[in-house]
Amino acid sequence: MQQLQNYINGKFVSPLSSEWIDNYNPSNGEIYSKIPKSKQEDVELAFEAAKKAFPEWSNTTLEKRSQLLLKIANLLQQKLVEFAQAESKDNGKPLSLALNIDIPRAISNFEFYAHALTQFGSEAHESVGKNTINFTLRKPIGVVGCISPWNLPLYLFSWKIAPALAAGNCVVAKPSEITPMTAYLLSEICIEAGLPKGVLNIVHGLGNEVGQAMVEHPQIKAISFTGGTKTGEHIARTAAPMFKKLSLELGGKNPNLIFADCDYDKMLQTTVKSSFANQGQICLCGSRIFVEESIYEKFKNDFIAETKKLKVGVPSEASSDLGAVVSEAHMQKILGYINQAEKQDAKILTGGKRVEVKDYENGYYLEPTIIEVQSNRCQLNQEEIFGPVVTILPFKTEEQALEMANDVRYGLSATVWTSNLDRAMRLSNTLEAGIIWVNTWLNRDLRTPFGGTKDSGVGREGGFEALRFFTEPKNVCIQYKN
Ligand SMILES: NC(=O)C1=CN([C@@H]2O[C@H](COP(=O)(O)OP(=O)(O)OC[C@H]3O[C@@H](n4cnc5c(N)ncnc54)[C@H](O)[C@@H]3O)[C@@H](O)[C@H]2O)C=CC1
Ligand SMILES: O=C(O)/C=C/C=C(\O)C(=O)O
């Protein structure tokens, strides 16, 4: 059975403990590889390698850094199919999704930051009448930590390491132990691309061992994390006394507000995607759907009909719209929420059950599920389920829709469907979320700030925001004689 390795100081190495974790294939529930069960001592090795590489990497010209990131992107492009197959097998997502979204986006992340680093500037302030000029240097921080989740494995792993490297930092990175494969394959590419040893180090293992050691490490000065809100809270509590820089991209319970005056067909097709893409395992999925009363019954019937057309099946088959959810434990968690529907006076309109796929009976397949709830205060509307489950609820007025949309602890994204520009602007101003989509969803321009408010996180990724996060500003004030 394949044994993955850590990538430390430019080489593949086994964990010092020689312990391994089983890696499951969600499509059939079988163990298909082993990953290092690394510990604090492996993190220390990675840190030492990164620290040693920092002086040279931070002084490497922007052109050279840019070329290396582009080389990684080119090699990824050449191996797109291999990577997409690996991602689909490791995560359970449809191969078509990995081929068309996950891996292309990982390539774009490297390309984007290869170019962004050459365009990144800093400010200068002339104090007129005082013969003084201030200018701000943007220094790489040193060794930084990147911790990524399992839902969009290489997509989010590269979304963190590309800007961290671009800004001149050396990196200790930890992919999710549930989906380690494409990060492992990326280490092969880094070697092939000639990335200097120690610049990027990838340590596999459990969150409460490897992740915890990274967060606790006194000399890893910044942590970029994407994952669950509870984990983010724990990281913040651990890191705060050490005054670490933190970027936390956490959970969401995003509202999807549908008004009667919208482009109905576009809304319907997009709402199916924003509900069930990647088996609903995207922090941006619109999991609370609020519909204007006058079109509620029509929407309900059409949405059910469209959802019933979705095929749940083996990830590698082109006809599968939904694959498997990521793990047995996660499947049980989602089913736990669905099974509470009745107690919460909610009605399952379609779905709600595990799916048995022929010859893949032990895979983690779930029906796309729509639940009609009676109140936004119910648990189904207040907690992140992170699976193919959405709720629907009618509203009478824009004010009521806004109130329900904001009445939740999360504030990541919101989607508004309307042809009324005034309403679109009013809601864009008042919805409590870091990202608002009007008449579209998951429409991404990598230059824009990405992140959430409230319990959805702290800080922003994307564009120059990430380069600002991964650098320390230093102001220089010079007074000169006339
Ligand atoms: N992007 C998002 O919004 C995501 C949200 N989630 C939510 O979180 C729930 C739990 O999923 P998990 O897989 O447990 O996510 P998680 O938040 O535990 O995992 C994300 C990453 O954090 C690491 N991690 C875990 N504990 C850590 C610690 N103490 N210190 C440092 N790193 C640590 C994990 O190993 C993984 O690499 C999901 O059911 C879902 O609701 C999960 C993944 C992504
Ligand atoms: O950057 C994006 O386009 C999407 C990011 C998605 C997440 O952070 C997530 O699902 O966790």
Image (cartoon, rainbow, N blue to C red):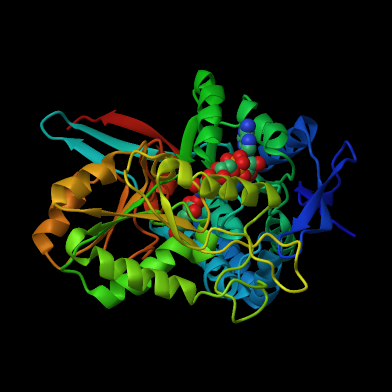
- Residue most extreme to the bottom: 318
Where, by quadrant of the figure, is residue 81 drawn? bottom right
Residue at screen point 87% across, 37% down: 16
Along the viewing direction, whichever of 248 and 65 lies nearer the viewer: 248
Image quarter (top left, top right, bottom left or bottom right) of the N terminus:
bottom right
Is 107 left, or right, of 80 in this rendering?
A: left
Is 211 left, or right, of 36 in this rendering?
A: left
Task: Give the percent coordinates (x, y) of residue 128.
Answer: 12, 35
Along the viewing direction, whichever of 460 and 19 lies nearer the viewer: 19
Along the viewing direction, whichever of 159 and 51 lies nearer the viewer: 159
Task: Give the percent coordinates (x, y) of residue 355.
Answer: 64, 65
Where, by quadrant of the figure, is residue 106 drawn? bottom right
Image quarter (top left, top right, bottom left or bottom right) of the C terminus:
top left
Residue at screen point 43% across, 44% down: 380
Q: Is residue 243 above or below residue 11?
A: above
Task: Give the percent coordinates (x, y) of residue 231.
Answer: 56, 34
Is 327 left, or right, of 159 in this rendering?
A: right
Where, by quadrant of the figure, is residue 454 drawn? top left
Residue at screen point 59% across, 81% down: 319
* Numbered-mark total: 0
Residue 202 seen anywhere in this rendered image of the structure: yes
- Residue most extreme to the top: 241
Residue at screen point 41% across, 49% down: 346
Task: Give the percent coordinates (x, y) of residue 418.
Answer: 18, 65
Q: Is residue 133 above or below residue 316?
A: above
Residue 111 seen anywhere in this rendered image of the structure: no
Along the viewing direction, whichever of 130 and 50 lies nearer the viewer: 50
Is 106 left, or right, of 371 in this rendering?
A: right
